[in-house]
Image: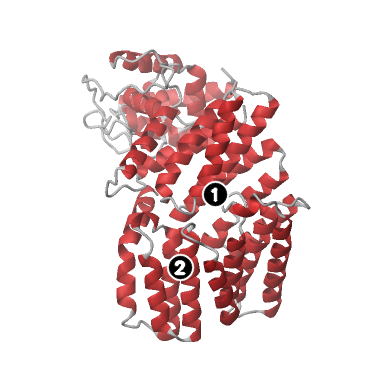
Amino acid sequence: MSGRQHKETEIARRVRARGLAVGRGLALIADEIHEVCGPQFGTTKIKSHRLSNGIALADVIEQVRALFERDGKPVPGIGETLLSAYESGMKRPGPEYLHYLCSVYRVEPLALGFEGPCICGHGHLAPGGSGAGDRQEERPDPSPGPRIPAVRPDSGTPSTDGGEEDENVLRRTLLKLLAGSAGVGMDSQVLGAIENVRRRMDDTMVTATVSPAMLDQWEQATTGFGRQYMNTPPLRLLCDVLLEFSAVRKALERRQPLDVQERLCRMAAQLAGLCGMIMIDLGDHRLARSFFRTGRTAADETGDRALRAWVIAREALVPLYYGDPREAVILAKKSGDMAGHTPCAAKTMAPVVEARALAILAGASGSRQDVIEQAKRALHRARAAFAQMSANDQEDPAFGYTERQLFFYQGDVLVKLGQTLEADVILEQALGKYSGEDLLDQTLIRFDRALCRVIEGDVDEALKMGQQAIDLVDQGHRTELILRPAHDLIKAIQTKYGDMPQLKDFRDSLVPGVLDITSPAEEAR
């Protein structure tokens, strides 16, 4: 033990002794140890609970193993190194290990420094104990803790990182969606599984034989998810993508031959980027940014400038929709610089995002002519870059960039610049390039055309077009990204004409979608 660790242990021992002497419970003593040792030694909450119990790492390991044995499960692979990583904050316990650590200390996950409920669905507190720092005395509870079913990967060996639990959450959610169950949303358990899958990919990217046929299947699946992006309900697609994402992560856990490693990293970057795109649609910008960071890490491993630029260009949409347009401009330019002279999707997409962000800034600053000119020059660069793209990239709406997308966003920029006549012509052309596919884009185009009518003074026609747009979207597709332009339309009408009576029916038609999409995300936060 180092001198620093020895001093930390000595201070914790004194706090524990004084607490026991006056009859304080172990949960309260753990809080006091965290308060005293945390600032000086960085003592985490989970470590504070071990110190409050006055036991060593080996004692905790033996208790966890005993609980596994009590529940009829194989001996777990947890050891002192892994537990030490939990206590240092380097790793987060998977749901199964977190459950058993809560059982050992008889507290809830929050008391150990981890948000969210335990997977067992029951409490761990000893009678009279709070487990979260409340000033109550803990008393021993001889009754066995709640049992949870064993979760084992396909190989039949016990899971050591909780990955199977998270995949099961996603599978159950997907099955409910496929069965048409009502009320399936992004609750805290689903959000926790999503974040855990992403975290594990981050962990394995810094360490990682797969048959060529399996690689081909994964690449085909990744491409297929990109084609489904515009038309599949986002939460259902997210479950599919994350399950594939998890399979790629498992392959990356062992270092592969360089060519295999590069293909796996490419898929990891694309799947992470696709998850980020879906999170934008669902309105969770925090998780979107997290997935794009994971995508960047994976893309950097490939050395592919076009892929790295694509991830950054997609990430720029987060501040475009939910943050500062100036940050979107910075990220778009960074993407363009990363692409360099390589003909690729990002070379087209980056200047389009830049133009959209500049158009928003122009509107906020009273249509400054210099900003308008910058936006138009960016669109010109995008059209020139599109002409140099490969035919495959021009047909891929997720990992590439299509002509119909280029027309759509050019019209979107013109709407924001107030040039409605030209915008409406281009948007009508864009809409004509879609058939039954790409529902997301078509809906956004219809709202842009409705906004043109508001600017031109035809409020009745604008609301009629807006209602038609929302009526074509079922509840599974009414994401934050779809509903945002509907609310922007309402705001534009209110700003120009006040709270007109005609707005009520349109506003009421949006309420079910808002409740389905935003409530789970807010609840998870």
- On screen, 64 above or below 171? above
| Quadrant of the snapshot with the N terminus | top right
First-in-chain label (1 vs 2): 1
On the image, the x and y values in percent for residue 62 come to 39, 13
- Which mark is on residue 264? none
- On screen, 411 above or below 436? below
**Foreground pick, 295 / 237:** 237
On the image, the x and y values in percent for residue 341 come to 78, 53
Amino acid found under the numbered disc labelled 1: Arg
Please name the residue shown 31% across and 82% down the image: 501
- Which mark is on residue 485? 2
**Foreground pick, 154 / 18:** 154
> What distance separates the C-alpha of mark 1 from that of mark 2?
22 Å
Residue 49 appears in view: no
Q: Which residue is mark 1?
A: 289
Q: Secondary structure at mark 1?
A: helix
